[in-house]
């Protein structure tokens, strides 16, 4: 089914460190809760899980992270 993007909702829960995405279409709605740690383990371009990155407590939303690519990242090969 096709979702109506203007009606997409994103909620942030800083206490639990997760995001709630709500998508709507003519057939109904869909809701997905995504933990911040899980999201940080994914490559921003491909969505694939990055090797060597865990979604544990040490991977908090407040921790700085170097990005290899994507929004706000650097393509200069920083490591």
Image (spheres, grey):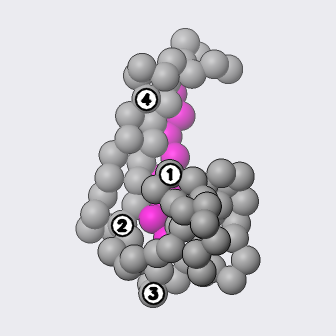
**In the picture, which quadrant includes the C terminus?**
bottom right
**Mark 4 secondary-structure assignment:** loop
Residues under labels 3 and 1: Cα distance? 23 Å
Give the residue furthest to the bottom. Answer: 58
For the question of whether residue 43 can be seen, the reply is yes
- Relative to residue 70, is residue 28 depicted above or below? above
Q: Give the residues in magenta.
A: 28-37
From the viewer's perspective, is 46 left or right of 66? Answer: right
- The reply to whether discs 2 and 1 touch (Cβ–Cβ < 8 Å) is no
Which label's residue is closer to the chain start, 1 or 4?
4
Label 2: element kind: loop
Q: Which residue is mark 2?
A: 17
Residue visible at 39% across and 77% down?
Answer: 64
Going from N to C along the chain, the mark reached first, 2 or 4, is: 4
Q: Indicate which disc, 3 or 1, sits on the residue closer to the N terminus.
A: 3
The tag on residue 8 is 4
Whole-Å distance between the Cαs marked 2 and 1?
20 Å
Residue 49: x and y in percent read 70, 66
Q: Which residue is the site of mark 3?
A: 58
Mark 1 = which residue?
A: 71
- Give x and y (percent) for residue 76: 60, 66
- Residue 16 horizontal side relative to residue 73, left or right: left
Q: Nearer the viewer, mark 3 or mark 1?
A: 1
Q: Nearer the viewer, mark 1 or mark 4?
A: 1
Residue at screen point 49% across, 40% down: 31
SS assignment at label 3: loop
Confirm whether the magenta stretch covers residue 71. no
Comes first in the chain, label 2 or label 1: 2
Name the main secondary structure of what is drawn in magenta: strand
Which label sits in the foreground, 2 or 1? Answer: 1
Please report whichever mark, 3 or 2, sits nearer to the chain's N-terminal start.
2
| Mark 4 / mark 3, whichever is N-terminal | 4
């Amino acid at each position: 089914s096709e979702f109506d993007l203007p009606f997409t909702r994103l909620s942030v829960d800083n206490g639990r460190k997760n995001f709630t995405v709500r998508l709507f279409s003519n057939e109904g709605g869909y809701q997905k809760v995504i933990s911040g740690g899980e999201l940080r383990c994914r490559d921003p371009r491909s969505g694939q899980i990055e090797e060597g990155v865990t979604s544990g407590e040490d991977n908090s939303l407040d921790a700085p992270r170097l990005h290899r690519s994507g929004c706000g990242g650097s393509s200069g090969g920083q490591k």
